Image: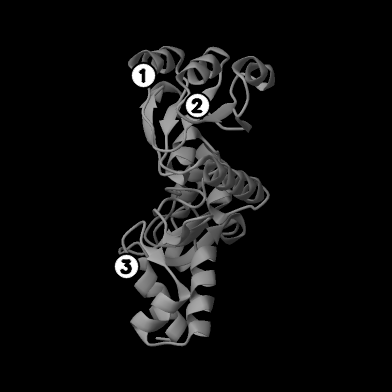
Amino acid sequence: MKKNEIVLEYIKNLPEGTKISVRGLAQALHISEGTAYKAIKDAENLMLVTTIPRVGTIRRKQKDPFFDRLTYEVITDVVEGTVLGGHGGMGMELHKFLIGAMTIDEMVKYITPGDLVILGNREDAQEAALKAGAAVMITGGFDTLPHIKELADKLSLPLISTSYDTFTVATLINKAINESMTRKKILYVSDVMTYNPIYMTPQQTVKYWKKLYTETKHTRYPVVDSKGMLVGMVTSRDVATASDDDKIGSI
């Protein structure tokens, strides 16, 4: 195993939230700081770690890196937050957020229903944002008043608390939005693959192939053995000159 692979494996086994530094890795694994630096960059690309302003590089929570919608569930994971209310709206997709660092009257002018407003422990502003149709992110790890939680539940608007400060939260959400936009431009194998595909075995007949074609209109099927291992592919060209009783394994 190469040094880089050893370091990546070490990082994978670290508990979530563990701070990671070039010097610390180099000392722990008796490697050069250059090797440690390269491994951390590779770990970032593999989404094993994330760099947070004013915090540093930490082992990130493992989750599906291929989310296709930036929902409030995803955002809550990104900021390592706690949902205080509005659970019914956690599946909504985030499109825009704003920082409510202004008077309530001015803040409301900028809110569009469905937005996310980032606030501190200003209960009056939290309530106003919810009534304007926005989800609310409370920074600094603060809780809020019971009637605000009830309002969030009633409106099904997420009310989330995170221990990070406003600057860090805005940075993390911006990064998540950019990653989401990038992924939407990339076509993954999972986007086009067929789950639980229809298949044939060598013992089945051409007649059965024709039955499958009538039902599915597919012109080719994978052929697997008794262990489920792929042994070939049978297509319309293969069966064109075969009789109905011919076995798939013989054509």
Alpha-carbon span between mark 3 and mark 2: 34 Å
Q: Residues within 10 Å of mark 1 (few under 14, many from 20)?
A: few
The amino acid type found where label 3 is placed reads: Asn
N-terminal label among 2 and 1: 2
The residue beneath circle 2 is 136
Q: Secondary structure at mark 1?
A: loop
Q: What is the number of the mark on residue 13?
A: 3
- Seen in the image, is 250 located left or right of residue 185? left
Q: Is residue 214 above or below residue 198?
A: above
Q: Residues within 10 Å of mark 2 (few under 14, many from 20)?
A: many
Given residues 206 and 80, the one toward you in this image is: 80
What residue lies at 67% left-to-right and 18% top-to-bottom? 106
| Foreground disc of the pair 2, 1 | 1
N-terminal label among 3 and 2: 3
Q: Looking at the picture, how far across and down is residue 98, in whole percent?
A: 62, 31
Given residues 55 and 74, the one toward you in this image is: 55
Q: Secondary structure at mark 3?
A: loop
The residue beneath circle 1 is 145
The amino acid type found where label 2 is placed reads: Val
Alpha-carbon span between mark 3 and mark 1: 39 Å
Q: Quick check: can you spot residue 218?
A: no
What residue lies at 31% left-to-right and 64% top-to-bottom? 227
Q: Is residue 31 above or below residue 217?
A: below
The quadrant the N terminus occupies is bottom left
Q: Looking at the picture, how far across and down is residue 241, in whole percent?
A: 59, 59
